[in-house]
Image: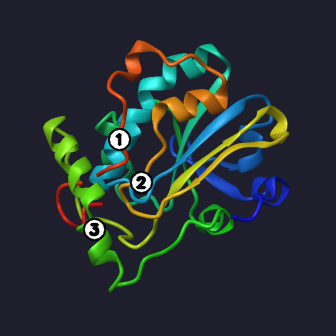
């Protein structure tokens, strides 16, 4: 994949989910290393499960000066996502989806999204999510994919750049810990596997 242009990416403007303030993405890594989790949709069952998984590292990340930040491509489903308590970090909205474009997060089309939604990884995580009591819905943009970016303090370098190929793809907790240099706490529990959701297109 092409290298990430942090200067260009950092100039993109995000909307805060609490006060609605606009901030440049680069301001989030100015004073700390950050784990940026880009969700497909706030109503996506798999995204909610992944958000809960990565949140298992929040205490360790915070204790080591690393910020955990979630970014969604639209406001649809945001309040329900926050009310559900799936994610322990700050949440922002990329209303223009410019970060998604700059980071190479693909968009499905009406034909490609169906087999993606029925894939083995998606079905496996859907089963895990359902077991954990995490459900999803069809609200919002069903075609956007996501990923993760970890940037060192001051924007010195990219520590990890992950692009989803399947909606069920995600970064294992131990890989996040390794990239950020934090110890893997017992909270991380079971080793996450790269699978994923329950309602076919609730991905």
Disc 2 to disc 3, C-alpha distance: 12 Å
In the displayed structure, 109 sits above or below 118; it is below
Residue 126 at x, y = what percent? 21, 50
Quadrant into which the N terminus falls: bottom right
Which badge, 2 or 1, comes first in the chain's sequence? Answer: 2
In depth, the one of 82 and 131 nearer the eye is 131
In the displayed structure, 41 sits above or below 176; it is below
Disc 2 to disc 1, C-alpha distance: 9 Å
Q: Residue at x 60, y 13 (%)?
A: 63
Which badge, 2 or 3, comes first in the chain's sequence? Answer: 3
Q: What element carries label 2?
A: loop
- Circle 2/circle 1 CB separation < 8 Å: no
Looking at the image, residue 14 sits to the left or right of residue 193; the answer is right
In the displayed structure, 150 sits above or below 183; it is below
Residue 6 at x, y = what percent? 80, 53
Q: Residue 117 carries which label?
A: 3
Q: In this figure, which residue is indicated by the disc labeled 1?
A: 193
Q: Residue at x 55, y 35 (%)?
A: 175
Q: In this figure, which residue is indicated by the disc labeled 2?
A: 169
Q: Which residue is drawn at 79% across and 32% down?
A: 153
Q: How crowded is mark 1: few (under 14 residues within 10 Å), some or many (20 or more)?
A: some
């Amino acid at each position: 994949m092409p290298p990430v242009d942090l200067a260009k990416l950092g100039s993109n403007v995000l909307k805060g989910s609490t006060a609605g303030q606009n901030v440049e993405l680069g301001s989030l890594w100015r004073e700390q290393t950050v784990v940026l989790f880009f969700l497909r949709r706030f109503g996506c069952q798999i995204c909610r499960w992944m958000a809960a998984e990565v949140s298992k590292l929040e205490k360790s990340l915070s204790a080591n000066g690393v910020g955990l930040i979630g970014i969604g491509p639209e406001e649809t489903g945001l309040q329900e996502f926050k009310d559900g308590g799936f994610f322990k970090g700050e949440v922002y909205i990329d209303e223009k989806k410019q970060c998604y474009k700059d980071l190479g997060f693909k968009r499905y089309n009406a034909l490609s999204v169906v087999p993606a939604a029925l894939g083995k990884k998606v079905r496996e995580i859907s089963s895990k999510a359902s077991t954990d009591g995490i459900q999803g819905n069809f609200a919002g943009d069903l075609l956007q994919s996501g990923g993760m970016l970890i940037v060192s303090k001051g924007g010195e370098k990219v520590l990890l750049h992950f692009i989803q190929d399947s909606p069920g793809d995600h970064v294992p907790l131990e890989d996040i810990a390794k990239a950020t240099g934090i110890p893997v706490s017992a909270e991380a529990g079971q080793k996450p596997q790269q699978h994923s959701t329950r309602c076919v297109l609730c991905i």
